[in-house]
Amino acid sequence: MKRLTLFALAITLIATVFAAKTPYQAVLQHSKIRGRAHGPNVCAMQKIQGSDKKYFTNCKQWYHRKICGKPTVVSYECCPGYEKVIGEKGCPAALPLVNIYKTLGVVGATTTKMYSERAKLQEEIEGPGSFTFFAPSNEAWAALPTEILDALVSNVNIELLNALHYHMINKRLTSDDLKHGAAFPSMYQDFDVHIHHYSNGIVTVNCARLVKTDQHATNGIVHVVDRVITAITNNINSLIDTDDDLETLRTAVAAAGLTNLLENEGSYTIFAPTNEAFEKIPPDTLTRILGDPVALKDLLNYHILKNLHCSESIVAGTPLETLQGTVLEVGCDGKDMTINGKAVVTQRDKLGTNGVIHYVNELLIPDSAKTLLELAEGSVVTTASKLFKDADLTGHLIGSEAVTLLAPLNDAFKDRSLAMTPDMKKLLRNHILKEKFSSKSLYHGQELETFGGLKLRVFVFRNNLCIENACIAAHDKNGRFANMFIVDKLLAPPMGTVMDILKADNRFSTLVGAIQKAGLTELLNKKGTYTFFAPTNAAFSAMPPADLNRLMRDPNELANILKYHIGEEFLVSGAVTSHTRLKPLTGDKLELGTRNSTVYVNRVPVVETDLMATNGVVHAVDVIIKPLPPKVVSDQPEGSTIRRASAMWAGSQVIKNDDLFQKVLRSHSSRTMSRVQ
């Protein structure tokens, strides 16, 4: 018992140690695992092809072999703090422990070492103390604009010493100490440096990425960073106030009452639209939004993320939540930072005390600030949008009415005439509901009133939510005043009972006569929820004449055959999946499926779907539907089959009637489609 207790404590301790790892340490550990075949203390690194950027690899990067959408090359290098030994595998030797000045040369920050000497900093970082030095790499210094670098390294200018002191903290901080959101006073006038430690293992200081961490020295520790950092003294509102390129944004922020938010403590990311971005918007749209406090606030909050994200933290597309309540897909494509897949970021990482600003040259307009027409024109329902305008329904799409638009996908019109006839106008009016609905609040059997005067029914299926024959194909688009449901089909409102539908279509003249002879007219006229796979005249003509004549003379047999074509439940085509079953009025079951956008019933193709009736739905078939033969199950070599019905009695030589077989049977039968409640 004591041994078990000790074992449990050991497991708990190990779990605690691993759980306590920082994201950076977890990624570093993964890189070590990937590199261990090359010797001790070897880390796998991924370098973006065509650039100097290297990353310790995490699982996703390792398997995708991509960073920012670009292919990577894997190399194997010494992990931080270790070096090679000639003649030995891997990196078995720890780097010599020397002072910070000498460590700068060992870790490849030779330019920082040179400037430390020039700025008279050498004596300090060689002497006693316990410092943390965020040392810019050689490439970081080379990337500085010439005029800035010249000003810093001038022999008569103390700015170089100030700049280097801003990269230093007067205590030792390992990567484990660099917590997300932490700020530490630098050795330049105690101005803070700001740390962000991201879940993907990237650590930044003032948005500069740590590319080599935890390089220990006798008097401190060195972290190599990929850029020269500058002091941060202003909040993000002050940064906006002093930039002429953000003049329109400054006015909008004041009008929306967001000034205090951007002045207060926080950790925000702002995608700041430039004046150019506002100028790209149609004047009427911009005037409407600027004049609507609710829409304007939503617009601006859509440009603000809840958390601070430096550009270096983004290595793949990531959905990030905005203050507006929805998400932006923030990603990268090579050197470009992207938003919703578009490279609209023109300037990155302007850091304030309470957040970071990235400049964008396009205005990001959330759905909640758009009219119905703007929602439709910016999505996959542009054909419907044009038709609504042609039908003189624009007033309903740009006003402040609380309505819901049922907008069919462009594909819904590919086989239809787009001529604006009176019937088309009437039909389009029935695509506008008189109230603002959310699809999540709809329920089975609900009726929705349209501007065309009809009441449309809601049907809830296991795999779909449909309004009459049109099923919702995408998430709701929630506009400023109105909502839009994107549906897969043009509506087909009910045009009478099932019997009325059949009588009005010449293709079913033989069927109508058969229904009357079979005594089913009253059934198909009364209230119900029937699904009728209605044989066309072609289906009856395909029968041998003698069989057809015999059938028409026998009302009972005729009734049985027709009832096998009538399901007890309401089922539109959008509710059919690959294995859907429907209980007919007589017989065992009808098996439905889809292939290449065609619905099949007992392997018979449906030639036209969704003829909507007040008491059901009609699907036309050109073949009389017959029951499928019993399915067979076999555990024998190919060529020998055993009927399921006889398998129950077949004994040990085929399939035994054991518990496992019963489970299989139950599983199979459980696929029967349950009746819609």
Image (cartoon, rainbow, N blue to C red):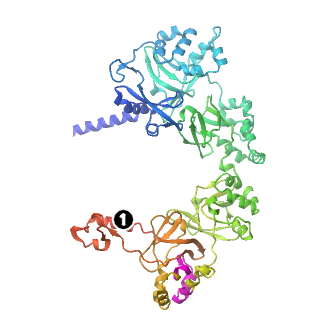
> In which quarter of the view is residue 165 placed?
top right
Residue 539: x %, y % from top left: 52, 79
Res 586 seen here: yes
Q: Nearer the viewer, residue 536 or 566?
A: 536
With respect to residue 63, does 498 lie above or below? below
Give above or below for 224 relative to 676: above
Q: Amino acid at mark 1?
A: Ser
In which quadrant of the rendered image does the N terminus lie?
Answer: top left
Residue 643, image x, y percentages: 31, 72
Which residue bears the numbered disc 1?
Answer: 667
In the displayed structure, does residue 644 sit left or right of residue 309? left
Asked whether residue 264 appears in the rendered view, the answer is no
Q: Residue at x 68, y 40 (%)?
A: 362
Please give the range of residues in magenta: 513-540
The verdict on residue 447 being magenta is no
Does residue 664 appear to the left or right of 180 in the view shown?
A: left
Q: Does 251 appear above or below 211?
A: below
Q: Position of residue 185 (x, y in %)?
A: 55, 21
